[in-house]
């Protein structure tokens, strides 16, 4: 498409034409060399980012990461001056679109510029009044962590994440949980234990099941990263503290779900001392659903403990459960028993 025509289209009286141009700008920028994209197309795109119609600004924000990749040399001159306005745009849909895009700008802008220009915007958006804005900021954490590294995350982003872990909207809390294993890998054991582990322990008791489930999954990934021995020393005592037969059985179910996700990364003595007692305890629970999860947990641990322990401790418990009054308990116990050595 000739450049002169693009210049005309950017001022077209129909906002739908301008919106279509905004959608196509990424493809156009990637069909030309970087010089043309940076010096000739970027000024046109910048005008679309500040268009009077919100629908055009939304489309331009969605195209922003790919346009930035193609025209890196024009970012500071044409795009950077507009970012503050996008972060406080009066239209929620624009701020949502910008929140989806801003994390992916870290690569094109580079580490130093991202730290100075984008991190303050991300901090601001993480406190936005609209939950979708806060949620999408968290959903694009990976490119941000790659761009600014552990020191930048620890000093600039982590405080906002910790605050969002208490958000009233459960989907925002969920997104914090979703990033926890990524952050654990980036920040290391000590900082994870100090900052993020208490957040995840609290999430194990969240009133939303989906968050409890995702927390168990993420803690399984964390144990995979740091190892079963670390988990036995630093994690399991606090994580399994909610296992109590005198309180809501859902807490016990959460502990057994956590056991399922951490068991593959815990062998030998760690599985025997830290996990098996919980599974055996569940096998005698008065609630059938807990006994079902107990049978599954015992099955998860068969390959993780030594053969003698499986025969002496796991097999008798499964044999008892296979004769349970509840047919579902019997079914899952029998499945696990079939995989358990007899001698």
Image (cartoon, helix red, strand yellow):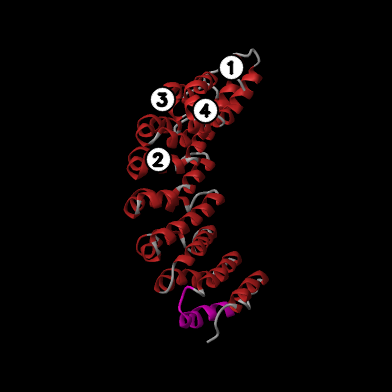
Distance from disc 4 to disc 2, alpha carbons, whole Å, reads 22 Å
**Which quadrant of the figure has residue 223?**
bottom left
Residue 89 appears at what percent x and percent y? 50, 22
Of the numbered discs 3 and 2, the one sitting upstream in the chain is 3
Q: Is residue 320 visible?
A: no
Q: Nearer the viewer, mark 3 or mark 2?
A: 3
Q: Nearer the viewer, mark 3 or mark 4?
A: 3
Distance from disc 3 to disc 2, alpha carbons, whole Å, reads 17 Å
Residue drawn at 35 percent across, 48 percent down: 195
Residue at the outermost bottom position: 343
Distance from disc 1 to disc 4, alpha carbons, whole Å, reads 22 Å
Distance from disc 3 to disc 1, alpha carbons, whole Å, reads 21 Å
Residue 208 appears at what percent x and percent y? 55, 48
Of the numbered discs 3 and 4, the one sitting upstream in the chain is 3
Find out whether the residues at labels 2 and 1 contact each other: C-beta distance under 8 Å.
no
Whether 319 is among the magenta residues is yes
Distance from disc 3 to disc 4, alpha carbons, whole Å, reads 20 Å
Of the numbered discs 4 and 2, the one sitting upstream in the chain is 4
Q: Which residue is mark 1?
A: 10
Q: Residues within 10 Å of mark 2 (few under 14, many from 20)?
A: many
Residue 239 position (above or below residue 202): below
Residue range corresponding to the magenta coloring = 304-320
Q: Nearer the viewer, mark 2 or mark 1?
A: 1
Q: Which residue is mark 4?
A: 95
Residue 161 appears at what percent x and percent y? 42, 41
State the SS at label 3. helix
Residue 227 position (above or below residue 343): above
Residue drawn at 52 percent across, 18 percent down: 47
Q: Which residue is mark 2?
A: 147
């Amino acid at each position: 498409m000739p450049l002169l025509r693009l210049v005309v289209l950017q001022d077209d009286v129909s906002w739908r034409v301008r919106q279509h141009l905004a959608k196509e700008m990424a493809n156009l920028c990637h069909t030309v060399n970087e010089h043309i994209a940076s010096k000739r197309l970027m000024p046109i795109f910048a005008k679309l980012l500040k268009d009077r119609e919100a629908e055009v600004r939304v489309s331009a924000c969605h195209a922003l990461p790919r346009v930035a990749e193609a025209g890196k040399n024009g970012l500071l001159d044409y795009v950077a001056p507009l970012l503050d306005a996008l972060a406080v745009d009066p239209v929620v849909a624009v701020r949502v679109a910008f929140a989806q895009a801003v994390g992916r700008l870290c690569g094109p802008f580079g580490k130093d510029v991202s730290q100075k220009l984008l991190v303050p915007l991300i901090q601001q958006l993480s406190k936005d009044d609209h939950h979708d804005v806060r949620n999408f900021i968290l959903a694009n954490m990976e490119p941000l962590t790659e761009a600014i590294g552990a020191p930048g995350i620890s000093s600039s982003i982590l405080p906002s994440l910790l605050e969002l872990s208490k958000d009233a909207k459960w989907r925002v809390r969920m997104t914090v949980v979703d990033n926890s294993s990524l952050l654990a890998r980036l920040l290391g054991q000590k900082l994870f234990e100090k900052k993020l582990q208490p957040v995840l322990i609290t999430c194990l008791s969240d009133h939303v099941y989906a968050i409890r489930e995702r927390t168990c999954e993420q803690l399984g990934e964390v144990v995979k990263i740091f190892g079963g021995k670390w988990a036995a020393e630093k994690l399991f005592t606090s994580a399994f503290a909610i296992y109590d037969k005198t309180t809501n059985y859902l807490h016990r179910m959460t502990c057994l779900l956590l056991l399922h996700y951490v068991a593959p990364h815990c062998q030998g003595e760690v599985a025997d001392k830290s996990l098996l007692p919980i599974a055996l305890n569940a096998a005698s629970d008065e609630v059938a659903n807990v006994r079902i999860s107990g049978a599954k947990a015992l099955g998860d641990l068969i390959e993780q403990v030594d053969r003698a322990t499986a025969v002496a401790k796991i097999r008798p418990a499964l044999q008892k459960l296979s004769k349970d009054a509840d047919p579902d308990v019997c079914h899952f116990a029998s499945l696990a028993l079939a995989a358990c050595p007899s001698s």
